[in-house]
Amino acid sequence: MDPQYDPQVIEAKWQERWEEARLFDAEPDAARKKYYVLEMLPYPSGDIHMGHVRNYSIGDALARYKWMRGYNVLHPIGWDAFGLPAENAAIKHQRHPSEFTFSYIDRMKVQLKRLGISYDWRREISTCVPEYYRWNQWFFLRMFERGLAYRKKSRVNWCSQCETVLANEQVVDGCCWRHEETPVEERELEQWFLKITAYADRLLDDMKVLDRWPERVLTMQQNWIGKSKGTLVDFRLNELDELVRVFTTRVDTIYGCTAVLLSPQHPVVERLIARSGSAAALKEAVEGIKASAARAGVDPNLEKQGAPTGFTVRNPYSGESIPVWLANFVLMEYGTGAVMAVPAHDSRDFEFCRAYGLPIRQVIVPKGGETADLSRAAFIEYGKLVNSGPFSGLNSEEAIERMTLEAEQQGFGQGTIQYRLRDWGISRQRYWGTPIPIVYCAGCGVVPMPDESLPVVLPTNVKFTGRGGSPLAEVEEFVSTCCPKCGGEARRETDTMDTFVDSSWYFYRYTDPNISTAPINASAVGYWFPVDQYIGGIEHAILHLIYMRFFTKVMQDTGLVTFPEPVARLFTQGMVIKDGAKMSKSKGNIVDPTEMCARYGADTVRLYMLFAAPPERDLEWSDAGIEGAARFLNRAYRLVARHAERLAGIVSARAQSWKVNDLTATERRLLRKTHQTLRHVTQDMEGRWHFNTDVAMTMELVNELAELEAKTHEIRAEVLKEALEYLVLLLSLFAPHVADELWEGLGHDEPALRTVWPAWDSQLAAEEEIELPVQVNGKLRGRIHVAAGTSEEEIRRRARADEKVAQHLDGKQVVKMIVVPGKLVSIVTR
RNA sequence: GCGAAAGUGGCGGAAUUGGCAGACGCGCCAGACUUAGGAUCUGGUCCCGCAAGGGGUGGGGGUUCGAGUCCCCCCUUUCGCACCA
């Protein structure tokens, strides 16, 4: 074989061979155990980036390992192909988004293939083709039938950059998730929603199945769903016949309520203005609070502001009359849009009431009997009730129960559960997405398209003006249609679906990507599911990863699947950063993987991605670092190549056939390192996933081999071959092309992937001579060398006898001597 | 503010259960080969000290024969949530 390492030649050769051999094609096979490795599908933005490379390098190492462990491995890839960037490019260049999308897919596919990831390319899918998105429509219709897809007018988040609505999950810090500088605006729009809230409890409960998901992701989802148990209480207005309903989790504090606070958007506010003696002033106050509430949405440190309405309500428990105020921090979207202010026991109310001089009245005292200092802050913990009429003396927990019951019996309130989670708004006023299969008929109203009529195909003759509004609304042939029910004139829905719908079920489609009679093939899903390992970025913790779970639950309810959760194990990898910041065009700190592949080869880039940091942490790109990876592969290649020809015909000694005593000291040393490395990597692949240490150990093995090269004559060919073969197999997880080249050089016809992953021999891996450090009073004073299995008594004797140790023991009395087998000896003196 | 994770050489990082801190790689220093080197190879490289020795894992305290690792307090960074009533 070529003594020089030429990654470009080698990588082209093996990519071709793998493809010819259909090496990564997987078909269901009941006789074999399956393993489904999934990486998040990329958006075809035009170029792959280092984040992709990292993601796929991790997945590929796992997939290749599982193949060699005898699994039938499904490892697919596809394209999240609908979306705004293509449409924006279309507007800019006056070409169709599909042109961009497909040319970008072609281009990224070339780049992706250049990496040599073990994908079954036959299963590739693109979400923007009618054969795929018709099933989005199909799912929508199933949800519509079940009342899970519904239409309502509501205040929604509008991104002026995207020119469309965003779901709540897509708003980050008051700004658009794609445009971090663009604050979302509020608009009133008729929108389609998916009723994810109906699944809130199941999304929470089923987390117990997700025991191999990162705790962090589950916590984030839990917080997002935000379940809280509380009480609704009606306060009657004294001045007019209206109720103001509040939600509280602390009804036990209600005797300390000194005001009721309204969101400026609360519907009762209009009626208060109408009945107010100073309507103009009140109206002005409302507008002022509205404005400051809007700012509060963006600036969390904004001071609490409010204004009295001049109206009062009656506390249904105490009968007391208390004032009604407007407050900028009361959210219309959560609870009822009104809260009871208990300044003594809620820090926000405390801040508010103190600012406006409203009374602060303590009704809870600490359980232990100590006093709570209410001059600086509220006492917000549970405690014992005081000054609370008949409930005085109760503990908070008990009081909440009793007082809620009281409200129910008296008819002025009830126990309830509130969620922070809101329904998923999926309407987008854009073109490049799945048409919503609905028509509006003057006679029949909102009419779903029948299944047989699917797909509702995106028309192609669209003008991309960039003027905003749904482009489909401008396409008369699309909009005007017949009502499927009565045949009369009707108009089509012109919004398209959020692209997160596409990615909510794509991983099912991989199991049979071309099935045209149903969204998924139940028997293929039955074989391959659940996804054994999903790998992707943490940024989808509460976007994609919650939508996906929701979809599966709907699929379970419609009988499509039989399980509640699609992904058994999730891994979230860290970002690739440069100069301390995420790589981005705007920062100009992008390192192009394709360029790196051209310079160093894909194996080097991939190896570096795995070596530079443990996978869950952020990885700082280093130009010098990748040089190191390249050097290592060079060294490894040349090392194996030097011996390949001589060893090609030799049959390797699989470890078991050797008796340890048959080996020369040099052979023993070589095989020890070999099997130690094999042990480390194997154990790590089974769960810990610190690939950086796996690569480091493999480097150590190469270093050991290089060091022993001078003594090659002391190593039998079969032994050297075993060591080199195992080295190559280890390498094949991280740098598969060069590994296959070397594997072939060592005399194998089949790629390394077709080999059974070797088992380490614990006898060979064991150290026979152990160096034990000896501490005297906690300080390292000497080292002794003993054979493995030396008795403790002998170790004690040897430790004392060590010259340096003896010096430190001189004239002292040994109080204690601790021998930790295999670790150290610790002597304590007086 | 709340929650989580993290803090180790000049840098990325290692130390799986409380047991030799700094594996592996980068960088740097010295040397070899060379017309040349940003190639390759050899040696060195936590700090102070000629050495013996001493110090050292964000800071302070504690438990222990022994702490990067466990406990308490504090600081910093990153991420998530942020008036959720």
Image (cartoon, rainbow, N blue to C red):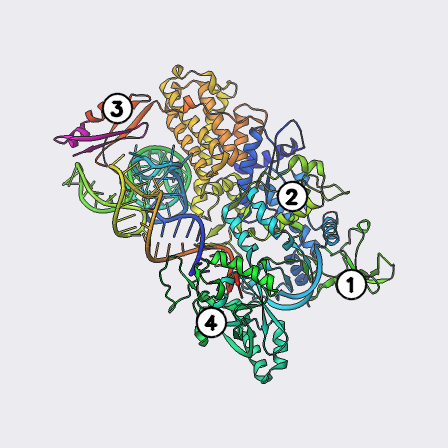
In the figure, is residue A258 to the left or right of A376? right
To which residue does mark 1 refer? A475
In the figure, is residue A142 to the left or right of B78? right
Check residue A117 for magenta coloring.
no
To which residue does mark 3 refer? A795
State which mark lies toward you, 2 or 4. 4
Q: CA distance from mark 2 to mark 3?
A: 59 Å
Q: Residues within 10 Å of mark 4 (few under 14, many from 20)?
A: many
User: Which residue is rendered at x = 43% and y = 41% of the image?
Assistant: A628
To which residue does mark 4 refer? A352
Instruction: List x then y, in percent, for residue A547.
Output: 62, 51
Instruction: List x then y, in percent, for residue A710.
Output: 37, 24
Q: Residues within 10 Å of mark 2 (few under 14, many from 20)?
A: many
In the figure, is residue A112 to the left or right of A465? left
Q: Earlier in the sequence, mark 2 or mark 3?
A: 2
Q: Earlier in the sequence, mark 2 or mark 1?
A: 1
Q: Earlier in the sequence, mark 4 or mark 3?
A: 4
Dots 2 and 4: beta carbons under 8 Å? Answer: no
Chain at numbered mark 3: A
**First to last magenta residue range:** A802-830
Chain at numbered mark 1: A
For this orientation, the residue located farthest to the left is A811
Q: Earlier in the sequence, mark 2 or mark 4?
A: 4
User: Which residue is rendered at x = 60% and y = 49% of the image?
Assistant: A203
Q: Indicate whether A297 appears above or below A606.
A: below
Q: Is residue A560 visible?
A: yes
- Which amino acid does the dot numbered 4 rest on? Phe
Q: CA distance from mark 1 to mark 4?
A: 53 Å
